[in-house]
Image (cartoon, rainbow, N blue to C red):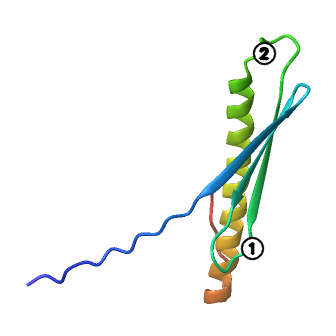
Amino acid sequence: MEEATIMQEKSWSVNVVIDVHESQTRATARLQVAKRPELVGIGMARLNPADSDVPEIGDELATARALADLAHQLIEVTAADIEKVTRAPAHLRA
């Protein structure tokens, strides 16, 4: 007879705040996980004067960059955690 597999589900939320000043859009992505320092990713986008002003595009690009920054930081934290446990260098890629 097979053993039942017990699934454990977790949920992490990222809060993204977008602000626009003149022709620059800034997105701040925050990840707070219990018992961990908050990680904050920052992304910027700026409107090229030759382009049409479509605010959603600046929002998307700044947010994508903030999330990429946040992902990079999370990989660094993970590598450090692996190194603490294994006492050997961790080689992780994004």
**In this view, 25 is above or below 11:** above
**In this view, 16 is above or below 10:** above
Residue 53 shows which numbered tag?
Answer: 2
The quarter of the picture where the N terminus appears is bottom left
Residue 10: horizontal and vertical position, in percent? Answer: 47, 69
Q: Amino acid at mark 1?
A: Pro
Q: Secondary structure at mark 2?
A: loop
Q: What residue does disc 1 label? A: 37
Query: At 73% from the left edge and 42% from the top edge, which residue is drawn?
Result: 65
Relative to 91, 44 lies left or right: right
Residue 34: horizontal and vertical position, in percent? Answer: 63, 76
Residue 19: horizontal and vertical position, in percent? Answer: 81, 38
Relative to 34, 19 lies left or right: right
Residue 91 shows which numbered tag?
Answer: none
Query: At 63% from the left edge and 55% from the top edge, which residue is drawn?
Result: 14
In this rendering, the count of numbered labels is 2
Q: Amino acid at mark 2?
A: Asp
Q: Nearer the viewer, residue 22 or 5?
A: 22
Q: Secondary structure at mark 1?
A: loop
Q: Seen from this angle, which residue lies furthest right?
A: 22
**In this view, 4 is above or below 27:** below
Badge 1: residue crowd in 10 Å (few <14, some 14–19, many ≥20): few
Residue 72: horizontal and vertical position, in percent? Answer: 70, 57
Query: At 74% from the left edge and 73% from the top edge, which residue is drawn?
Result: 37
Q: Earlier in the sequence, mark 2 or mark 1?
A: 1
The answer to which quarter of the image holds residue 86 is bottom right
Q: Seen from this angle, which residue lies furthest left?
A: 1
Query: At 74% from the left edge and 23% from the top edge, which residue is drawn?
Result: 55
**In this view, 53 is above or below 34:** above
The quarter of the picture where the C terminus appears is bottom right
